[in-house]
Image (cartoon, grey):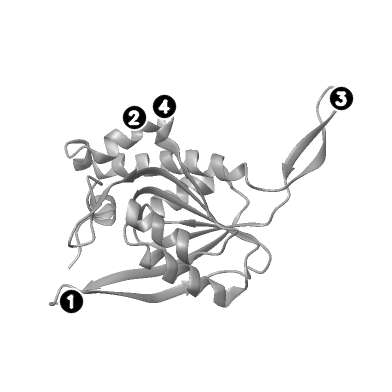
Amino acid sequence: MEVQILNHNNSILNSFLAELRDVTVQKDSMRFRKNIERVGWFLAYEASKSLNYQVQNVTTPLSDSQENTVSDAVVVASVLRAGMPLHNGVLEVFDTAENAFVSAYRIENPDGSLEFKIEYNAAPNLEGKTVLLCDPMLATGNSMLLAYQALLKHGTPKQVIILSVIGSEKGVEFVNEKFPYNSKLIIAAVDPILDEKSYIVPGLGDAGDLCYGSKE
C-alpha cells in the first residue's frame, strides 16, 4: 500500500491541523467541524492525482478547449458519525460522486478488550469503482477494515483510497497489512503512540464528540 503523509511538507494544511489539536479552539464545535472539512479538501485533491482521466471538449464563449477530466466512477464512503465533516469536505471536491455510509463503532469491555461492530451499511453498487473511504481518526485500523469489508457486500471496487486526518503508526501498519495491494492511504498526520485505551497520542481527542457533542 502506498502511504502519503501530508504534513511532512509545509502547507496551510498544518495550520488547520494545529487548530484541530488545540484544546482551546476545540471548544468551538462549528470551527472544529469546518477544519475537518478543510482537511478533507486537501485529502481529496491528493486523491484526485491517483484517478484516471479522459479528454473532454469544452466550448468557451470564444473558442473550444480540451481539458483532462476524471473518468473514474467515484464513491465517497464514510464511517459514521465522526466521518461526516470529512465526508462533506471530500464531497465538495468530488461533487458528482456517489455516496456510501457505514456505522462502525467500538465497544470497550470491562476487561479492557475492544470489540468492533457494524450496524448500518448503505451504499450504491461499488463494482469497478474508486472508493474514497473516509474516517478522520485511524487508531487501531479495525473499524476501517470492518467498514471496508462491509462495503464489499455491494461489489468489489477497482481501488480504495483511505482518507484520514490523524492516525497512529500502529493503525497505518495495520491497514497496510490488511488492505488490498492496490489500496492507498492519504493522511494528514501520523502520531507515534496508541495508548492502552487505543487513543492516538498526541492526537486530538474524540473526533465524534468534538464534532457533535458527547454521547451516553
Q: Position of residue 71 (x, y in %)?
A: 73, 50
Q: Amino acid at mark 1?
A: Asn
Q: Amino acid at mark 4?
A: Asn
Q: As drawn, is 144 to the left or to the right of 107?
A: right
Label located before the other in sequence (4 or 3)? 4
Q: Secondary structure at mark 2?
A: helix
Q: Please give the residue where the numbered disc 1 appears in the rendered image.
A: 109
Label located before the other in sequence (3 or 2)? 2
Q: As drawn, is 4 to the left or to the right of 24?
A: right
Label located before the other in sequence (1 or 2)? 2
Residue at the far left in the pictured view: 110
**Residue 15's disc number:** 2
Instruction: Check if mark 3's residue and mark 2's residue have beta carbons within 8 Å.
Output: no
Q: Position of residue 174 (x, y in %)?
A: 40, 62
Q: Which image quarter: residue 160?
A: bottom right
Q: Please give the residue where the numbered disc 4 appears in the rendered image.
A: 10
- Please name the residue shown 18% across and 62% down the image: 197
